[in-house]
Amino acid sequence: MREFVVVGHEAPTTAEFSLDDLPGAGRLDVLCRCVTAAFRLSHDFRADVRVRLVLEEEYVVRFEGSELRHLRPDERSAGSLIRGALEARDGAVGAMEATASPGVHIGAGDLGTAVEAAAETGPVVELHADGAPIVDLEPPENVAFVLSDHRDFTDPEADLLERVADERRSLGPAPMHADDAVTVAHNYLDTGGFERY
Amino acid sequence: MREFVVVGHEAPTTAEFSLDDLPGAGRLDVLCRCVTAAFRLSHDFRADVRVRLVLEEEYVVRFEGSELRHLRPDERSAGSLIRGALEARDGAVGAMEATASPGVHIGAGDLGTAVEAAAETGPVVELHADGAPIVDLEPPENVAFVLSDHRDFTDPEADLLERVADERRSLGPAPMHADDAVTVAHNYLDTGGFERY
């Protein structure tokens, strides 16, 4: 299992946004591309992946690859699933998530709860341009990568990650978009640390 | 300079398509994501990149990073530039391209002419799932990567590439989308072959 926790700092928390303007919806285009990058393969699908999108410290949308249906590789497709999750958000009560569609769940939460849940199954690696090169790290099993959208982590988020993350790593010298980081992180794991394939 | 030649096998050759349904326009979403993946960095832009999109063996749209404006990171933005190029296509006469917007040019052409032009500035590397691991290859200067959209190269295209490409390489064991391949290829070059950064 591989997991990606992506923090959306301006992402919508209601379904009142247009699929025709995902950038205008708090740069939801970035989060959409993170979701598709996490699951898509050429003519295939990564079932052993989980994604948690943290929306504005209010909601966490959880995508389970083993259950997921109806995700195509384009941005709008992921946007539609996120909108569906936000339409179902009032069904989430306390710690109980609501299920919006197969493999798409929503619950109250923030980065802290998302990382806590991710840490139950494996090590947590923060991806950050300022981290040490990931190439020196033996690819961990069942890793959860934590990354931020087009904005950097806030100070409280950075403090939290400094406490709870096992590693803080960079994927390369060029500062990359979050969704490109998801793609490169998959490649790093697929190739056993860019080597053994 | 880095160059990407991407072949679109069902891509539109007229501007008669909707930005609201890029997948329905011959999977133009794939080509759009290839363009944005080639140029975007986090809060920055790769000016030393050229992309040639081969549309249905009829037209080649050339994106020049050093001239390009108005490209945002979302799919629609690239789709809009491609539509603009197709609107300007009748201005291309013989070997002369038409310029649709800053850094976006269109001309008659196919994979053969695109690769021939790319080969003038550096080595040509075909990216293919069946190629030898790229990790064994010292990153070449001024390389042009050639890749296909959601379809494999046709037999004539494969024959052409076997003749003219200097290398045929795979980026990893997982069969990836063309746009993810662009992202990983950049990372391979950025990190000096996944090592020296």
Image: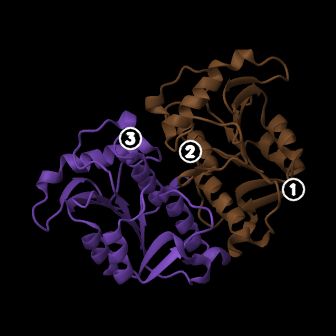
Chain colours: A brown, B purple
**Image x and y of residue A87, in percent:** 62, 19
The secondary structure type at the circle numbered 3 is loop
Q: Which of marks 2 and 1 is in front?
A: 2
Q: In the image, B2: left or right of A99?
A: left
Q: In which quarter of the image is residue B8?
A: bottom left
Q: How crowded is mark 3: few (under 14 residues within 10 Å), some or many (20 or more)?
A: many
Residue displayed at 73% across by 69% down: A192
Residue displayed at 17% across by 52% down: B89
State the quadrant of the C terminus of chain B.
Answer: bottom right
**Residue B57 visible to an observer of this rendering:** yes
Instruction: Look at label 2 and name its amino acid.
Output: Arg
Q: In which quarter of the image is residue B120?
A: bottom left
Subunit bearing disc 2:
A
The secondary structure type at the circle numbered 1 is loop
Q: Name the residue under label 3.
A: B22
Q: Which of marks 2 and 3 is in front?
A: 3
Q: Mark 2 points at which residue?
A: A33
Q: Name the residue under label 1.
A: A166
Q: Residues within 10 Å of mark 1 (few under 14, many from 20)?
A: some
Q: Distance between the residues labelled 2 and 3?
A: 15 Å
Residue displayed at 49% across by 42% down: A74
**Image x and y of residue A114, in percent:** 80, 38
Q: Nearer the viewer, mark 1 or mark 3?
A: 3
**Image x and y of residue B152, in percent:** 42, 62
**Image x and y of residue A41, in percent:** 58, 53
Mark 2 or mark 1: which comes first in sequence? 2
Subunit bearing disc 3:
B
